[in-house]
Amino acid sequence: MAGQPTKYNSEVQKRAEEYVNEGYIACGDAVPSVAGLSCELGVSRKTLYNWAENSDQFLHTLDRLSSKQERTALTRGLTNDFNSTIVKLILANHGYSEKSNIDHTTKGEKLTMPKFVMDGSKKTDSE
């Protein structure tokens, strides 16, 4: 069973490149996105990914879209032009994460937690 013929052609490739370059702004998008590109081309996101599987040129275009999205979100986030929560969500899709490195090693020493008594003086477990 054969599927429908692809709508991908040199004109679609040209429109996709225009969207990634600066066309996303003219479309009203704050950052380029796969969702935005799919709307502008009138196809589903799945179709875009299928085209990328079959065309190195289109795969390169989607990769540039991702890089431009990351750069735009990072830059506009650092200058407070974008909402920090939204930037955090966008950048999470690019491998960024919020982490705290905590060293839990004690080198064999016993850790004691301070105890507080009613008069406000501080005592430790060793007392």
Image (spheres, rainbow, N blue to C red):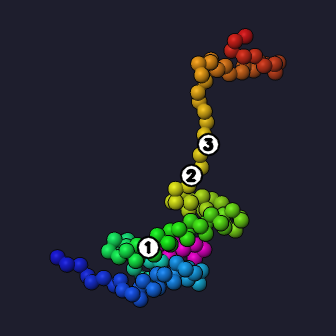
User: Looking at the rendered structure, which numbered label has been put on residue 100?
Assistant: 3
Instruction: Identify the residue shown where x is 69% and y is 62%.
Output: 78
Q: Is residue 40 left or right of residue 26?
A: left
Query: Magenta span: helix, strand or loop, mainly?
Result: loop
As drawn, 99 above or below 36: above
User: Residue placed at 41% from the left, 89% from the top?
Assistant: 11
The 10 Å Cα crowd at callout 3, few under 14, some 14 to 19, many 20 or more, is few
Q: Give the residue type that dot 3 points to.
A: Ser
* 53 and 112: which is toward the camera: 53
Q: Name which residue lies at 61% across and 24% down.
A: 106
Q: Is residue 35 magenta?
A: yes
Q: Which residues are magenta?
A: 29-36
Name the residue type under label 2. Answer: Ser
Do tag 1 and tag 3 residues touch (Cβ < 8 Å)?
Answer: no
Q: What whole-number distance in Å separates the C-alpha atoms at marks 3 and 2?
A: 10 Å
Q: Which residue is mark 1?
A: 60
Q: Quadrant of residue 8?
A: bottom left
